[in-house]
């Protein structure tokens, strides 16, 4: 019985199956968790979603920015780009079932008392308890009859900084941006959502979110995240486990084995 957490799959169905085969993953015996961006850009988002859905209670996920964007495209709120590679999924006869299944997942999830999953990371001004609370706010909206309104309002880079008085769509947008798009943060804790490079190539005024001291994060807590392929799995601390190793860009797909604290990868 094993528990695995996998990095960004991004519709790379063949790579997903090869990686799971490499660890002899068995649904019903083992559990698979994902840090979001299940689909988009890869060669087969449709079969990726169908397979993950078929795993039933052996699979859990948080949502990434590409997952939320697909939901928006599926409702005609935004148009897909050619690079999204979503056309087979959008034309699938079971698209309504797949979108309903995708909508059930939160933005952040506790794997256990020590490990928290989130697509982009933990905003340095939040504790993990706050992260999970704010994630639940969005999850409730995403499951409601007003879910399309949430998606319509999520696009945009502001507000740049969190404060407790944020409300309405400004609050929702910040929570979504922090959990699904964040990479760099200014020392003031303002998000910068435009720079996507590796930390060594970024302006000196910006720091990776995990390099900003967060007194609300206990030393024995760990954050498992994806989203940032340019990191190639490297952060400044074992407390932050980066699992997006850029398979869709020709690099590798990675999962973390909880019981051994080991990362296993397959090359593209």
Image (cartoon, helix red, strand yellow):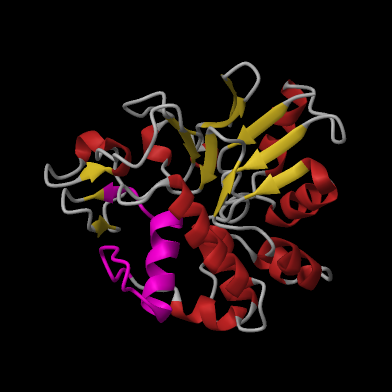
Q: Is residue 71 magenta?
A: no
Q: Is residue 160 magenta?
A: yes
Image height of 252 relative to 52, above or below:
above
Residue 87 in the image: x percent, y percent?
A: 66, 67
Residues in magenta, as a range: 157-184
Image height of 252 relative to 41, above or below:
above
> How many discs appear?
0
In the image, what residue occupies the spot 16% across and 48% down? 187
The outermost residue toward the left is 204
The outermost residue toward the right is 28
Image height of 41 relative to 15, above or below:
below
For the N terminus, give its image quadrant.
top right
Image height of 119 relative to 268, above or below:
below
Residue 214 sits in quarter: top left
Residue 138 in the image: x percent, y percent?
A: 54, 67
74 relative position to 250: left or right: right
In the image, what residue occupies the spot 31% across and 68% down? 157
202 relative position to 163: left or right: left
Residue 78, visible in the rendered structure:
no
Residue 193 in the image: x percent, y percent?
A: 30, 58
Residue 33, visible in the rendered structure:
yes
Residue 137 in the image: x percent, y percent?
A: 53, 67
Taking depth in this image into account, of 15 and 136 the one nearest to the observer is: 136
In the image, what residue occupies the spot 67% across and 83% down? 145
For the C terminus, give its image quadrant.
top right
239 relative position to 26: left or right: left
In the image, what residue occupies the spot 83% across and 68% down? 94
Taking depth in this image into account, of 126 and 169 the one nearest to the observer is: 126
């Amino acid at each position: 019985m094993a528990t695995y957490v996998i990095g960004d799959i991004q519709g790379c169905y063949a790579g997903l199956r090869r990686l799971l085969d490499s660890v002899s993953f068995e649904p019903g015996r083992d559990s698979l968790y994902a840090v979001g961006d299940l689909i988009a850009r890869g060669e087969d988002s449709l079969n990726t979603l169908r397979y993950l859905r078929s795993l039933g209670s052996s699979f859990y996920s948080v949502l990434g920015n590409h997952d939320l964007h697909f939901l928006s495209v599926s409702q005609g709120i935004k148009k897909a780009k050619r690079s999204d590679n979503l056309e087979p999924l959008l034309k699938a006869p079971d698209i309504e079932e797949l979108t309903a299944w995708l909508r059930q997942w939160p933005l952040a999830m506790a794997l256990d008392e020590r490990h928290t999953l989130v697509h982009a990371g933990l905003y340095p001004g939040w504790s993990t308890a706050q992260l999970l609370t704010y994630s639940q706010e969005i999850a409730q909206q995403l499951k409601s009859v007003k879910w399309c309104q949430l998606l319509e309002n999520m696009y945009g880079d502001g507000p740049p900084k969190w404060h407790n008085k944020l409300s309405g769509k400004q609050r929702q947008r910040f929570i979504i941006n922090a959990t699904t798009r964040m990479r760099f943060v200014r020392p003031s804790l303002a998000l910068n959502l435009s720079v996507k490079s590796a930390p060594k190539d970024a302006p000196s005024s910006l720091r990776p979110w995990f390099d900003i001291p967060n007194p609300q994060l206990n030393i024995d807590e760990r954050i498992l995240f994806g989203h940032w392929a340019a990191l190639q799995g490297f952060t400044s601390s074992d407390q932050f486990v980066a699992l997006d190793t850029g398979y869709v860009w020709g690099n590798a797909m990675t999962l973390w084995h909880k019981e051994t604290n080991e990362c296993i990868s397959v090359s593209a």
